[in-house]
Amino acid sequence: MMVAGPLVIGTRGSLLAQIQSRIVARLLRAAAPRIEIDILTLDTPGDRDQVTPLTEVRDPDFFSADLDAALSDGRVDLVVHSLKDLPQQRPQGIVQAALPQRDNPRDVLLLHGRVDHKLARGEPVRIGSCSVRRRAMAPFLEVALPNRGRRPRLEFAPLRGSVEDRVAQLYPEQGSLDGAIVALAGLNRLWMDPEGQRILRPLFESLRMIVLPLTECPVAPGQGVLAVECRRRDAATRRLLDRLDAEGVRRAVAREFSHWRAQGFAASCGVTAQSHPALGELLFTSAGLKVATPPKPRRAQPFDGAWLRTQRRSLPVQLPDNSGGALFLAHWAALPVGLDLPRETRVWVSGTKSWQRLAARGVWVEGCAENLGFEFLTTTLEAAALRLPPLDEWTVLTHRDAVSSWRDSGIGRTAASYELRKPQAGARIAGEVAAASHFFWGSPQQFERARPWLPDHAHHACGPGKTAAYLRARGVAAPTLFPSRHAWQQWLA
C-alpha cells in the first residue's frame, strides 16, 4: 500500500528545524523516489517565547504541542523533532516511527577570539546556556581553557533562541557573552545547508571552537538524534518511515533514557551511549564511563607497570609550513616546552589529562580522543562545522618508537618530538613480574621491558589504541581492552 497524495511534513519555524525536515525529506525520497513531499511550518510555544529560560519552563509540550495537534487532526502526516526536546509522555495516537542515523552527539563550546585577552588578564568569561547540565561542566572548562598560572573564571548567563541567534550573541553589537555551549549536531546540520552556512560563515570568522569530551561532559539523552513521528493508525506512512529507522540508534537512546529514568529525570544528568569498534557499547554518564567487562577473576596478582614510567627527553622537531593547520599530540610531552605554535594552529590531543597539562602551559586545545584511540576520534574530526583539514594535511607529534605505528592512520606527517628512556629493572622487579598473573600495559615499551620475565599464562590488558595492535602483532591473541588503567584496576578490585 503506497502513500496517497503528497506527504506533508510538519516542522517548527526555526531554520534548524526546517533543515532537519529537509534532511528527512531527502531520506524519504531516497527510499521512495516517486514520493511527493510538502513541508508545512508551524509555530510552537517554544518558538513564540524566546525569553523565558528553559529552567523556568513548566510545560513539557513547550516545543511540541502545536505539531502534535496538526498531526492528530490530519493537517500533516509526519513531524520531525530533535529527540532531546520531546517530553517523555507522548499522545496515545502518535508513534515514534523512525530514528534515522545519529549526528555527532557532543556539545561544543564556542568562544569569541577576545577571550584570549580576558584569560590573560584574569577577567571572567561569560558563557551563555540555560541548561543545568551544561552549567555543571564548569569544573572541566576551568582546567581545559588555556591559562598560565591563572585559573579561568567562568560566569554563566541565560541564553535562548535559535542556534544562529545564540552564536550572534557572542558579538558586542548583539550581546554581552563571550561564549556559548551548543550541540555540535545542530551546528553541523546548519553548516551543511547552503542557507545555514551563509548565515554562520561570517559569525565563525572570530570564533574558537572546543569540542567537549563525553568522558567529562556527557550530553542530554537523545542529543543528535532526529525523531520522526506519525499517527499510530497511519499504516502506510509507518511502513515508509520504517525504512529510515536505524536500529543501532534506537538501542543506544533506549539505554540513555533508561539511565536518565533511573536518575529521576534529573536536569543535571548527562548520559550518552556510543559504540566503540574495540570496546563495544559504551555509556558515558555524569558518574563516569560504563563499559562491559569480562567476569572478574577469582584470584589475581596484578602488575600495572608503574615502575616502568619512563623519563622523557625532547628531540629537535620542526613543524611543516602548514603547522598553522592541524596538529595531533599523542601525549602532553609531545609538545616541547618553548615551541611556540601559531595562533591559528588547531590542536587536538589523546586524552583529557594531556589536555589539562597543555592548557596549564597556555595551549589552546580543541578536543581529544578521550583515551579511546585515534580511530574513535576520526568521525568527530570529519564534522563539517569544525572546518578542519583532511587527515592527510595533519601532523602528529609522538615519541620516537611510536612513529611507525601511525603509518596506516591516514595522517599526512608524523614526527618524533621526544624519546623514552627505559628504566633499569632489578631482581625484585623481575620477580614481581614473574609472580604476577594480570598485567596492564600503557605502551608497547612497557610490555617489551617486562617481556623477558612474563609468566606463560599471563593475562594481558591495555587500552583500545595502538598498544592493543602492538600486543596482537607480538603474539598476544586477545588482550582484554579497558578504557583506562583505572577501569582495569576497578575490575580487579
Image: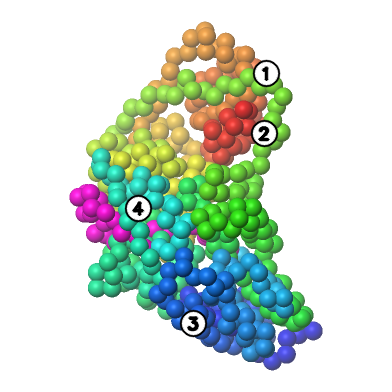
Q: Provide the residue designation for mark 2.
A: 478
Q: CA distance from mark 3 to mark 2?
A: 53 Å
Q: CA distance from mark 1 to mark 2?
A: 15 Å
Q: Local crowd at mark 2 within 10 Å, few (<14), some, or many (≥20)?
A: few
Residue closer to the observer: 21 or 124: 124
Quadrant of the image for the C terminus?
A: top right
Q: CA distance from mark 4 to mark 1?
A: 45 Å
Q: Which residues are magenta?
A: 102-128
Residue at disc 2, secondary structure: loop
Residue lying at 72% horizontally and 78% vertically, measured from the top left: 93
Does the image show residue 379? no
Q: Earlier in the sequence, mark 4 or mark 1?
A: 4
Left or right: where 324 falls relative to 394 = left
Location of residue 316 (image quadrant): top left
Residue lying at 47% horizontally and 47% vertically, measured from the top left: 216
Q: Provide the residue designation for mark 4.
A: 346
- Is 111 included in the stretch rendered in magenta? yes
Residue at disc 3, secondary structure: loop
Left or right: where 54 falls relative to 327 = right
Residue at disc 1, secondary structure: loop
Q: Provide the residue designation for mark 3.
A: 13
Left or right: where 100 falls relative to 141 = right
Q: Provide the residue designation for mark 1.
A: 456
Question: Relative to residue 406, is residue 310 depicted above or below?
Answer: above
Residue at disc 4, secondary structure: strand
